[in-house]
Image (spheres, rainbow, N blue to C red):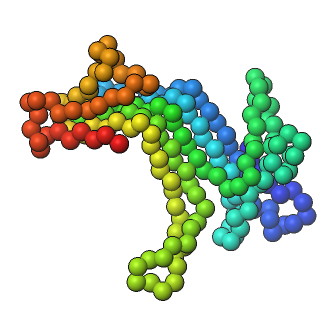
Amino acid sequence: MIMRPSGADVASKGTKYLALKATADFAGLVGIDDFKLSASGITVEYNTVKTTDPTETRVVDFKASFPTTAGYKLDLGNGELLLNFDTKRLLVSVEVADLQISSYVFVHGALAFEKTDDIWVSIIGDATQTKMSATNIGGQDLTMFFGADGPYWTDLNHDTARHSHQQHRLHRHPAASGSRRSPVRA
């Protein structure tokens, strides 16, 4: 949703308020040999203001603006989407992500990225605090492998398949040299 002030305030005509909420059950990249990328349980949320005034950080508070519905109900034709943001927001989360690059890189697990409000921190040796932008990056049940000819999974139930509900372990193949393979479990 893109919104612009429409009142008599000419100075705010260049201000745009943007809000986005999107979900997808699955998305994937196809058609590239030796490269696989897929994600399921995808959520994207965005609420911001675009203006030439760098001090303007106010965003639309949808909950306060539409209190009877706890947000703005956007008719999509096949259902409604509730924009219920009450702060500035940028969030992307994926319940299950898979990345494979040939036999060298394997990543599997849940990921989330969230832009947070600016924070003030103390830097060692500085007398005053410094304003920093921050992004939270999180992962859950991540399994990663970076190396050659891998990965080497321990199949806990011996069915030769990886399951999201099953714990997986990477291990070093007996023939692996220490410098060629670097399994990581996070």
Q: Which percent across, then down, holds residue 42?
A: 56, 34
Residue 184 as seen in the image, left or right of residue 74? left
- Tally the marks: 0
Taking the view exactly as shown, the residue that stands out farthest to the bottom is: 127
Q: Residue at x 32, y 17 (%)?
A: 157
Name which quarter of the figure residue 125 lies in.
Answer: bottom left
Taking the view exactly as shown, the residue that stands out farthest to the top is: 159
Q: Residue at x 26, y 25 (%)?
A: 154
Q: Residue at x 55, y 72 (%)?
A: 120
Q: Which percent across, then down, holds residue 60?
A: 77, 54
53 lies above or below 98: below
Q: Which percent across, then down, holds residue 108?
A: 38, 33
Residue 102 in sight here: no
The quarter of the rendered structure image containing the C terminus is top left
Residue 157 in sight here: yes
Residue 116 as seen in the image, left or right of residue 21? left
Name which quarter of the figure residue 57 lies in.
Answer: bottom right
Q: Which percent across, then down, holds residue 6?
A: 87, 56
- Nearest to the observer: residue 180 or residue 141: 141
The quarter of the rendered structure image containing the N terminus is top right
Residue 62 as seen in the image, left or right of residue 26? right
Name which quarter of the figure residue 176 lies in.
Answer: top left
Q: Which residue is drawn at 85% across and 39% down?
A: 69
- Nearest to the observer: residue 2 or residue 184: 184
